[in-house]
Amino acid sequence: MAFLARSEHRLGVLALLDGTARTRSDLEAHTDATRVTLSRVLNDLTERSLIEHDPSSNAYTLTQFGALVYRDFDRLLGTVAVGQALPSVINRLPVDWFGFDLQCLAGSEHVGTEQADPLAAARVVAGAVGAADSCRSLLGTFISLPMYTFGEAVRKGTAPSVTVIADAEVATTMTEDAALRERWEAIEAGTDRTTYYRIGERVPCSVDLIDGETVFLTVNRHQDAGFDVLRSTHPDVVAWAHATIESMQAGAVPLSQAARADD
C-alpha cells in the first residue's frame, strides 16, 4: 500500500489498466508522466507482479494480483474520501448494515448544512416527497415534516404513491402520540389504501427512496439533538435501498392493525 501511495503515477497506471490492456503509447497518451518516469513506473509495477507485458501485442495488463491490489486500494481511497467529505457523520453511519461499499457515498450530499435552521434537512426530504411521483420509506428516525407534506398533498388530491415502514420504536411513537395517530389515520382514510406499516425490529437509520432513483439516509446525532441527512443517487445505494425496503415490507404488518392490537 505504501508503495502505491508514494506515487500518483503508479496508481494512475493501475487505474488505466483496470479492465483493459494498453500499449505503452496508449499509456503515455493518458498520463502526464514523462517517458522516463513512465518507464520507471512500468518496471516497478512489473517487478512487483502487479502488471505484465505481452511482447506480441506490446500491451500491458493487470495481473490477477494487481487487479486485487488496485481494487482494494481504490476502495480504501473511496472510504477516506467519504471521511474527508463527511467528517461529522462518518462515525455514525451504520456501515455494517449497508449493503454497499462506503465509498459509494463519496459523492453524496450532506443536505441542510448550509442553513442555520435545524429543520433545514427535514425540509429538503419533505420537499422531495412532495415533488415525487413515488416514495418508499423505512423509518428508524421519526421526522414529522414529510408526513405533514404528504398529508397536505392528500388533502389537495396531488399525493404521490407512498409506502412507509416504521421500525418498532418509531411505530410506538406513531401509535401512542394521539396527534400523530390522528394524522396518519386521516392520511390513510384520504388515500383509501394502507400507507403505513410496522416491523418488529429496530433499524439504525431512515431510508427514503424517491422515484426509485434518489436515496435519503437519515442518522441520529448521538449526543446533540437532531439528525443528519445524506442524499445519494449512486446506483449501488439505490439498489440497496430498494432491496432493503422490499425485504422489510415483506415482514411488515399494517400500522393500523398493530395499533388496534395494542389498544
Image (spheres, helix red, strand yellow):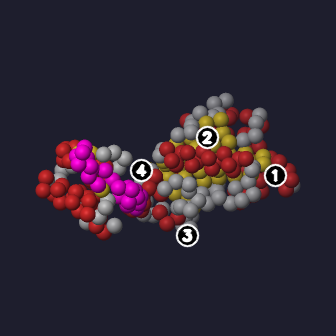
Say which residue appears at 14% left-offset and 53% top-offset: 34
Dot 1: what SS?
A: helix
Sequence-first tag of 2 and 1: 2
**In this rendering, does residue 31 appear at all?**
yes
Q: Which residues are magenta?
A: 52-77
Amino acid type at circle 3 is: Gln
Q: x and y percent of residue 64 in the render?
A: 39, 56
Pointer 4: what residue? Answer: 107
**In this rendering, does residue 145 appear at all?**
no
User: Marks 2 and 4: which is nearer the front?
Assistant: 4
Q: x and y percent of residue 93 in the render?
A: 53, 61
Sequence-first tag of 3 and 1: 3
Q: Is residue 68 magenta?
A: yes
Sequence-first tag of 3 and 2: 2
Q: Which mark is residue 223?
A: 3
Dot 3: what SS?
A: loop
Amino acid type at circle 1 is: Ala
Pointer 1: what residue? Answer: 258
Pointer 2: what residue? Answer: 135
Q: Is residue 227 left or right of residue 3?
A: right
Crowd rating for badge 4 (residues with CA inside 10 Å; few <14, some 14–19, many 20+): some
**Vertical order, 203 against 243 (above or below):** below
Q: Is residue 252 left or right of residue 1?
A: right
Say which residue appears at 86% left-offset and 53% top-offset: 261
